[in-house]
Image (cartoon, rainbow, N blue to C red):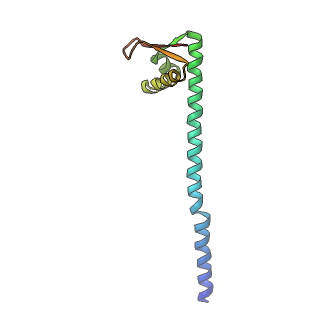
Amino acid sequence: MNFIYGLIAGIVVATIVCLIWPKKKETKTEEKVVYMSGDEAKKKENLAKVEEFVAKNDKITNDDIQNLLGVSDKTATRYLDELESQGALRQVGGQEKGTYYEKI
C-alpha cells in the first residue's frame, strides 16, 4: 500500500515540475521579445513622422518634435541625434536656444 501512495505522490510532483515550472521561464522570455519589438516599431514610426515633417518644412526644432510626437525634451533630442547620425539632418547652431535642424 505504501508503494502505491509513493507512486502517486511521485507522479503529482513530476507533473507539477514538468508542467508549471518551465512555462514560467518561457512566458517571461516571450513577453520581453514582444515588448522590445514594439519599442523598435514605435521608434521607426516616430522617426518617419519626423522625416515627413522635415520634408514639408525644411527645418525642425526640438520643440517641434515634442509637440508632434508628444515626447519629452530628452526623447526629442535622441530622435534628432539619430537622424543627424544617419545623415538625414544637419544641426544649425550650438546647444543654445534657437538651434534647429535642416534636411541635407
Does residue 32 lie above or below 39 as drawn? below
Expressed as whole percent of the image width and height from the top left, the position of residue 18 reads: 61, 66
Expressed as whole percent of the image width and height from the top left, the position of residue 84 reads: 50, 21
Q: Residue furthest left?
A: 96
- Quarter of the image that includes the N terminus: bottom right
Q: Residue at x 57, y 47 (%)?
A: 31
Expressed as whole percent of the image width and height from the top left, the position of residue 51 reads: 58, 18
Q: Residue at x 60, y 33 (%)?
A: 41
Q: How many marks?
A: 0
Q: Quadrant of residue 73?
A: top left
Does residue 38 lie above or below 84 as drawn? below
Expressed as whole percent of the image width and height from the top left, the position of residue 5 reads: 60, 83
Q: Quadrant of residue 36?
A: top right
Q: Residue at x 42, y 13 (%)?
A: 99
Does residue 96 lie above or below 21 as drawn? above
Q: Residue furthest bottom?
A: 1
- Quarter of the image that includes the C terminus: top right
Left of 58 or right of it: where is 75?
left
Does residue 70 lie above or below 9 as drawn? above
